[in-house]
Image (spheres, rainbow, N blue to C red):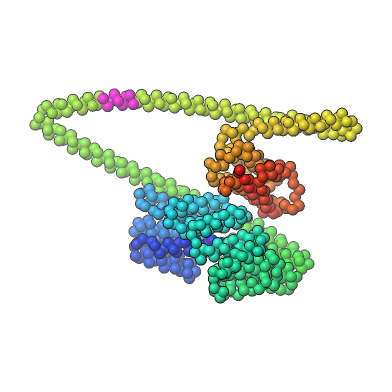
Amino acid sequence: MKSLYRLFFFTTLFVTIFCQAQKDTITTKFDDEIEALYKKGIQLIKIKNEFDKGLLILDSARTLAKADENMEQLVRVNYASATGYILKGDFDVALNLLKKGILMIDTMNIEGKQISYDSYVNHYQLIGYYYAYRSENVLAMKYYRKALFYAEKDPEMCLPKVNTLNQIAVLLIQQKSYDEAIHYFEQINDVYVNDYILKNIYTNLGVIYIKKEDPVKAKEYFLKTKSLMKEDKVGLDMLYVYIGLANVYYLERKWQRSLQYYQKSYVMANTLGTQKEIINIALGFSEVYSELGEFSKALPYLSIAENTIAKVSSGGETNLMTKNLYDVYSDVYEKAGNYKKSTIYLHKSIALSDSIFAIDKTREVERLKIQYETEKQAKEIEFLTLQREKKELEIQQKETALERSRLLKNVFLISFLIILIPVVGLLYVYFQKLITQKELSVKNEEISQQKITEILRTQQLKTIKATLQGQETERKRIAQELHDSIGGGLAGIKLQLDQYTKEDSTIKNTVSNLQEICEQVRDISHDLIPKKIVQNAFTTVISNHIKTIDSTSEVKINFLSNSEEAINNIDEQIQAELYKIIQELFTNMLKHAEASKVDLSLNYYDNTINLLFEDNGKGFNIYKKKSGIGLDNIESRIKALDGNLNIDSHIGRGTIINIDIPIV
């Protein structure tokens, strides 16, 4: 179903704006002119959807805040502008503003100004949303967790914490980690609840159960959302409920009920003027009529979707909607028996997919440019900070020198009046100097001895490390020789003798013995390698393995792990099995996937280890692909650990492997 395509993003972004709107009502007193411009810009953006006018007014507020050197107001105005650019669809401009905002917050903290944690929370939330929109899920989760870290520092920040939990849960829905997403929604329920938040929770839970193809549970939550609103209310919340119920009845194959709710959705979407929702509803209509075999009714709705897409501003999201349109066109014509047109639209979809990929590459280059500029500015700020500290130190040294000069003048004046006192004073100073020099000499000698001791200790550590590395290398070499040379040779002999087993029972017994020896050689070679798990933290072993792959291939690998201490403390046998599973996953990827990017995350929650492996390779048909030895090995290891394996792969769209292993 294509009609739920927009639901996730609107639900998440609505909570973001809602939380910020709540905060605006409790801000401290600022410069009146800047504050007036700030509030007017926010009103134009969030209430009237006049993005260009609102952003222009916020630019004026930013200019005044810079002139007044009012950093706190400048941070707020930058954040509001970033929100406006996100709503407008200029995500890269928004990211640049947000990163500048974080640098300003860091600078204010260095200068000793008290900045509330919610400034960090708001910025990290929107950066996470940026990466989620670009489907860079690992980076999105990284920034959402940063936002959650700061939100949990202040017990009074209920709404920012709720918003962050909601964004993490929505991201998990997109990653198809539905049970974990439900876990985060339950945390929202424990933190803070009002009707607005309940509507978002129920709507997203309805979406989850649609994705899990459980229409009964999905209907339950959509009806709960509906019960919190007036039946005749016209708004996005009710629109999403109608779209959700249309999807529910689609799954139940109750076509007339599905059409009924699509009709309600279509009327409301036209009233609200939400063109992107109109597109998805029109696609939903066409899919239902296609299932009914009424192709003459399906095609006009596809035309409506096509004409509406033409009205929407161009961009990455528009390209995705156009691709969905071509896919539905192809499906409808295929069911109608018009294979020629079906093939035409299929080729259009494939061509647009290639175009989207090229656009994403261009955006990535632009993002890296912006990141470079941001890092350059950060270094400049750091340099200026060091320069300021240096000047302060020079001033302090000059003041100390002046104070010493005044003291000497007083001594000379007193020496004219009393001869004895200056003589005693000089002797005292002289002896103090001797004592100080002696102490300084002893101290220098101690420091020198410490340096010598440290050098010796460092050398000893290097020697020990080199010895351990040599042992590990030798163990690996022996394991490889056993596996590749001896094991391969025995396997070759076994294959040669197999052809005589039917003729001679003695040879058959010999072949059986050879098989046992082959298995023993394999076991010995595998047992030699995992010693590194005993000697190192498990997450470090994985990181080192990834670095090895990075150095020998062109694949970019992102590795993210939370609760590292808990993961490193699990049973070594489980660690060894996990390590072998990860090795096999990377081996299969390198052999078959032709991927350029891999995301690997390792998480621990509710006494469960979750391993998520995602690549952007060529994928495969999981219903037709025959299981290989590598995949069989992975499945057997997971089964031995009472774990669960879920594989999601489509040709041309990469592969996602999700593994859950319980920790008793």
Q: How many marks?
A: 0
Residue 215: percent from left, percent from top: 66, 63
User: Does residue 60 show up magenta in the picture?
Assistant: no
Specify the quadrant of the image occupied by residue 504.
Answer: top right
Residue 166: percent from left, percent from top: 53, 58
Q: Is residue 334 visible?
A: yes
Residue 382: percent from left, percent from top: 40, 46
* Residue at the extreme front of the image, as rendered: 664
The overriding secondary structure of the stretch rendered in magenta is helix
Give the side of residue 71 with respect to residue 83, left or right.
Answer: left
Instruction: Name the residue located 10 percent from the left edge and 27 percent from the top edge.
Output: 419
- Quadrant of the rendering where the C terminus is positioned: top right
Asked whether 267 or 402 is in front, the reply is: 267
* Residue at the extreme right of the image, as rendered: 503
Give the side of residue 389 with respect to residue 328, left or right.
Answer: left
Asked whether 562 or 640 is in front, the reply is: 640
Specify the quadrant of the image occupied by residue 32.
Answer: bottom left
Instruction: Name the residue located 28 percent from the left edge and 25 percent from the top edge.
Output: 437
* Residue at the extreme left of the image, as rendered: 417
User: Residues in magenta?
Assistant: 435-443
- Quadrant of the rendering where the N terminus is positioned: bottom right
Asked whether 198 or 501 is in front, the reply is: 198
Asked whether 67 or 650 is in front, the reply is: 650
Q: Is residue 317 visible?
A: no
Instruction: Name the residue located 53 percent from the left edge and 50 percent from the top edge.
Output: 142
